[in-house]
Image (spheres, rainbow, N blue to C red):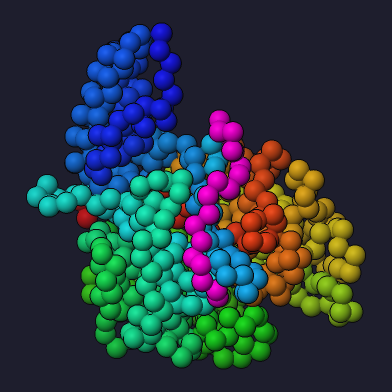
């Protein structure tokens, strides 16, 4: 009997270089065909017959649709287990010439290099500050017109840089384990359109790529979006009409309701130098608002001021179901989550606070106690719209909420991953804590104390694994967690009970960025090659 491994099969078939074939689809069809035919592979001929049958069906399927999945539940039920994790990694040493990079982490538990960085794609430029990433095509491009001349392919990962305004385009299709930079867009391209500090990237169904921006050419606050075509030529800014958002950050669109929502951080010339309390004296340069746009006309029609509690609304998500008119935004500074929902009789949205994580009164060594907010820097929703995950970068915990009743989230579980109030920090005194009776212990995995707190999160398609990184933004890392900036950050894994709810830290998984080739580095946002809970947006088929 011949024994064939999947990677050996792929390497033996040049025909698989066909750009229309989805390897994950092919892999599933291969094993499905074998099971249905009850075929035992005794010879090379029987293997060849099965493979070419699988390729035929995979090619047929691929030609009917674009990348991703038909629905969120299709992704949850039929999506493959993740094997690679693309992780944006920042070099805190600004004199190091290799600069920031994309780390490829092996997350295949059957691999000998599991939980290791197996490749690094360096930008070879100082001072970029890579931050978030996005795709040239995702599930919003799944449905393809039968008369279309080409089928969209998810083969480019886009990495905007917050500080340099450069944008890096990476080929992830030729060798998914070794992405390669194929295009660099100079920061002057954005400045020529009077925008800077590119942040969130989403692909559009028409083939364009849209990136939110946070500043004008001088670094003052400006909320807008910059468009690129499928060849990454700049098309111009997106917003039309006279109304403009004061600040920018994240965005999410829901075409079924002809709406897009965006959030606000602040002016680049303020947040780039670190946090200062006095920055809140001018709320035209720091954000506290949700902005709703008419998707079809690209015009801003409703702005909701969230007040002081809603300062720095960052990550925003509609529920994944493309026919749902509601979603959540995490407000960082004071750790509040607001729920928004479209009114049944108009295009206006109602917004209300649904999660209120209280400040702690903490003396961090100065002798004076002050309010410490939780700093919610990320939220993520499971693909079945059942669980909402919220992190507190300063307090140090990740929270799981049941959102079966969307406007009444129920706290189900918490996991502690460091933070600024750990019991082993000698100069920290918690004067008042409305939630805890004692300080949480430090988090130690494989002998390494985790510095910093939980930052970006990425959930597996089936909802069973939650990956968590530690870096927020390197100037802020150096300000709030100097030990992490000097020792390096990390990526850890939380196992999730998707039946009853609940989370457990996996003590066998740790990616330590303290021993990188060019010094300790800081991991931020994470992506799977085939799309994930925060990169993909679904369109209603009958929209």
Q: Position of residue 39 (x, y in %)?
A: 32, 11
Which range of residues does the magenta coloring cover? 109-127
Q: Position of residue 165 (x, y in %)?
A: 45, 77
**264 horizontally vs 300: left or right:** right
Of the 4 image quadrants, the one containing the N terminus is top left
Residue placed most toward the observer, 536 or 433: 536
Q: Residue at x 53, y 36 (%)?
A: 108
Q: Residue at x 33, y 10 (%)?
A: 43
Picture quarter containing residue 273?
bottom right
Of the 4 image quadrants, the one containing the C terminus is bottom left
Q: Is residue 142 magenta?
A: no
Asked if residue 352 can be seen in this view, the reply is no
Q: Position of residue 394 (x, y in %)?
A: 70, 66
- Tell me: residue 529, above or below residue 479: above
Q: Main secondary structure of the magenta part?
A: loop
- Tell me: residue 326, above or below residue 93: above
Q: Position of residue 446 (x, y in %)?
A: 76, 43
Q: Could you tell me how many numbered marks the image carries? A: 0
Asked if residue 310 can be seen in this view, the reply is yes
Residue placed most toward the observer, 388 or 1: 1
């Amino acid at each position: 009997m011949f024994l064939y491994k999947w990677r050996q099969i792929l390497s033996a078939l040049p025909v698989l270089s066909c750009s229309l074939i989805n390897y994950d689809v092919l892999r599933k069809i291969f094993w499905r065909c074998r099971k249905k035919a009850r075929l035992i592979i005794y010879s090379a001929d029987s293997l060849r017959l099965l493979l070419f049958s699988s390729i035929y069906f995979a090619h047929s399927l691929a030609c009917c649709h674009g990348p991703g999945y038909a629905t969120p539940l299709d992704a949850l039920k039929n999506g493959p287990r993740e094997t690679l994790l693309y992780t944006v990694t920042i070099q805190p040493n600004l004199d190091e010439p290799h600069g920031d990079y994309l780390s490829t982490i092996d997350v295949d538990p059957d691999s000998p290099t599991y939980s290791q960085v197996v490749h690094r794609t360096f930008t070879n430029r100082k001072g970029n500050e890579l931050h978030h990433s996005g795709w040239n095509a995702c599930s919003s491009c799944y449905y393809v017109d039968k008369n279309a001349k080409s089928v969209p392919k998810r083969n480019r990962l886009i990495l905007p840089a917050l500080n340099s305004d450069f944008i890096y385009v990476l080929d992830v299709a030729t060798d998914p384990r070794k992405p390669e930079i194929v295009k660099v867009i100079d920061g002057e391209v954005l400045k020529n359109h009077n925008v800077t500090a590119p942040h969130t990237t989403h692909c559009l169904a028409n083939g364009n790529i849209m990136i939110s921006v946070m500043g004008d050419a001088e670094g003052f606050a400006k909320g807008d979006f910059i468009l690129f075509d499928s060849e990454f030529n700049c098309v111009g800014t997106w917003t039309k009409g006279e109304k403009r958002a004061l600040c920018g950050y994240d965005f999410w669109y829901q075409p079924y309701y002809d709406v897009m929502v965006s959030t606000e951080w602040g002016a680049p010339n303020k947040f780039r130098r670190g946090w200062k309390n006095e920055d809140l004296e001018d709320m035209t340069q720091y954000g506290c608002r949700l902005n709703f746009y008419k998707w079809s006309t690209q015009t801003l029609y409703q702005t909701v001021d969230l007040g002081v509690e809603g300062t720095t609304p960052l990550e925003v998500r509609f529920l994944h179901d493309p026919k749902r008119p509601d979603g959540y935004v995490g407000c960082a500074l004071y750790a509040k989550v607001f729920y928004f929902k479209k009114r049944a009789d108009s295009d206006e949205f109602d917004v209300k606070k649904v999660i209120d994580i209280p400040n702690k009164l903490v003396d961090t060594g100065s002798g004076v106690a002050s309010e410490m907010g939780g700093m919610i820097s990320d939220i993520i929703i499971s693909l079945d719209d059942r669980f909402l995950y919220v992190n507190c970068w300063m307090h140090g915990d990740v929270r799981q909420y049941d959102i079966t009743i969307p406007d009444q989230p129920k706290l189900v579980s918490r996991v502690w991953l460091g933070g600024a109030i750990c019991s082993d920090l000698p100069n920290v005194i918690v004067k008042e804590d409305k939630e805890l009776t004692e300080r949480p212990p430090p988090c130690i995995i494989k002998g390494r104390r985790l510095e910093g707190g939980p930052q970006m999160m990425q959930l597996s398609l089936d909802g069973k694994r939650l990956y968590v990184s530690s870096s927020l933004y390197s100037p802020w890392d150096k300000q709030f967690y100097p030990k992490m900036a000097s020792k390096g950050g990390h990526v850890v894994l939380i196992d999730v009970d998707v039946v009853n709810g609940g989370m457990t830290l996996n003590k066998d998984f740790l990616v330590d960025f303290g021993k990188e080739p060019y010094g300790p580095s800081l991991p931020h946002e994470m992506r799977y090659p085939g799309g994930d809970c925060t990169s993909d947006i679904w369109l209603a088929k009958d929209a």
